[in-house]
Image (cartoon, grey):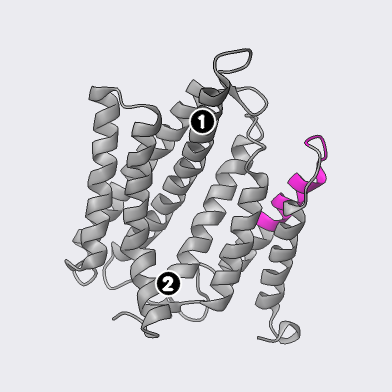
Amino acid sequence: MSLSADPVALLAAAAMLAYGAALWPAAPERRWPVQALFTAWVLHALVLLTGVGAWGIEGQGLRLGFAPVLSFTVWIVLAVHGVESRFLPLAGPRRALALAGVLAIALAWAFPGEVRAVAHSRWAPLHWVLGLTSYGLFGAAVLHAVLLDTADARLRQRGPGIGSGTIGAGLPLLKLERLTFRFVEAGFVVLTLALVLGMRSEAGWSWDRKAVLSLLGWATFAALIAGRLWRGWRGRQATRWLYAGTLLLLLAYVGTRFVYEVVLHRQPG
């Protein structure tokens, strides 16, 4: 791909460079890594809108594929982190998120997927938008769960003491746990709507691997929410269910598309 001839490729390269700058080690009081991450996020949004990522402009429809969906998911997680970091001390994930951004754009550049019409029923476009949004919400939940598990592991190693109930610059662990499962609940509601609308799309629903794995993921999240409400699941017991449900969702669409696009070198019908 020629950078000089393709403005979309230029945007992708600029976004990757900005994410690379945000990856650079810096003291916590330095502001430029955060500014670099924000710049990268804005450029990433432009990449998505202009067709390398989740949305296609070469015709009517969505740009579909395992890499565009991952790119859109990472972008949503970064958006959530950007909003939260203005109110809560969650500076720790900056470098991990910047690395995820670089990898997401690189993958979407290498495997751009295809633009496909999704308007075979009036519900299909909303079904796809909700599905992509649920990926982002569960991605944000996983980010919080990783922070929660990391803090819990440090607590177990260190034992009780001053500040043992906080993470980073002072976010209480209980508050982080509540935030984690607020994202789970929001993602579950959005995923439920996506699945219901998918079933109402006459030509868009079939009982294939993607559908079965999606329903298994939905059932896993339902069990997690029920377990927290009625059995008091917390900590690692709860996060394991979150990781399992998210993995099932990833296998449902991203995994299936990866096999078609990378292993079989063809697009699914």
The residue at the point 24 percent across, 37 percent down is 223
The residue at the point 63 percent across, 13 percent down is 162
Residue 51 visible within the image: no
Q: How far from the left and from the top, in percent, is residue 78?
A: 59, 49
Q: Considering depth in this image, is 245 or 203 the residue closer to the camera?
A: 245
Q: How far from the left and from the top, in percent, is residue 181?
A: 40, 33
Q: How far from the left and from the top, in percent, is residue 156?
A: 51, 24
Q: What residue type is labelled 2?
A: Leu
Q: Residue 64 carries which label?
A: 2
Q: In this view, does 17 lie to the left or right of 187?
A: right
Q: Is residue 85 left or right of residue 22?
A: left
The residue at the point 26 percent across, 65 percent down is 210
Quarter of the image that includes the C terminus:
bottom left
Number of numbered discs on residues: 2
Residue 234 visible within the image: yes
Q: What stretch is highlighted in magenta?
A: 28-41
> Is the residue under label 2 in contact with that under label 1 (CB below 8 Å)?
no
Q: Is residue 38 magenta?
A: yes
Label 2 crowd bin: few (<14), some (14–19), many (20+), radius 10 Å? many
Q: How far from the left and from the top, in percent, is residue 174?
A: 48, 21
Q: Is mark 1 on a helix, strand or loop?
A: helix
Q: Nearer the viewer, mark 1 or mark 2?
A: 1
Residue placed under numbered mark 1 in the picture: 153
What secondary structure prevails in the magenta region?
A: helix
| 6 vs 101: above or below | below
Q: Is residue 81 left or right of residue 245?
A: right
Label 1 crowd bin: few (<14), some (14–19), many (20+), radius 10 Å? few
The image quarter containing residue 91 is top right
Q: Name the outermost residue toward the front.
A: 157
Q: Is residue 179 magenta?
A: no
Label located before the other in sequence (1 or 2): 2
